Image (spheres, rainbow, N blue to C red):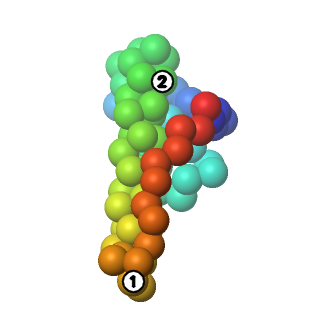
Amino acid sequence: MKFQVVIEEDLEDGGYVVHCPALKGCWSQGDTIEEASGNIKEAIVGYLKTLNDRAMHDIKSPGRALIKEVAVI
């Protein structure tokens, strides 16, 4: 799965800030573009894991539900 991210130079503090517009509130930063890119990848993975974990808590009858993991590439 691919996401577009926005990387901007941080003129005030130096380095770069980066966010993923598709995932509200998913931001990171880094001293270089490469570091900021790596950090936002980690932030996106954490964001999606949190969404998934929260959704799993909303299952109404977990004893009767089949839970299966699928990979999305």
Q: Is residue 22 above or below residue 42?
A: below
Q: Amino acid at mark 1?
A: Ser
Q: Residue at x 39, y 18 (%)?
A: 35
Q: Which residue is mark 1?
A: 61
In depth, the one of 28 and 44 nearer the eye is: 44
Q: Residue at x 39, y 50 (%)?
A: 49
Depth check, mark 2 against mark 1: the one in front is: 1
Residue 19 in view in this figure: no
Instruction: Tell me: 20 left or right of 10.
Output: right
Q: Quadrant of the C terminus?
A: top right
Q: Is residue 53 above or below residue 45?
A: below
Q: Is residue 53 above or below residue 2?
A: below
- The Cα–Cα distance between marks 2 and 1, rounded to whole angstroms, is 39 Å
- Residue at 44% across / 73% down in the picture? 65
Of callouts 2 and 1, the N-terminal one? 2
> Which residue does the numbered mark 2 point to in the structure image?
37
Question: Dot 2 lies on which element?
Answer: helix
Side of 4 relative to 19 (left or right): right
The numbered disc on residue 41 is none
* Observer-nearest of 64 and 24: 64
Classed neighbour count for the residue bearing mark 1: other residues with Cα under 10 Å, few (<14), some (14–19), many (≥20): few
Q: Position of residue 55 (x, y in %)?
A: 43, 69
Indicate the amino acid at tag 2: Ser
Q: Quadrant of residue 61?
A: bottom left
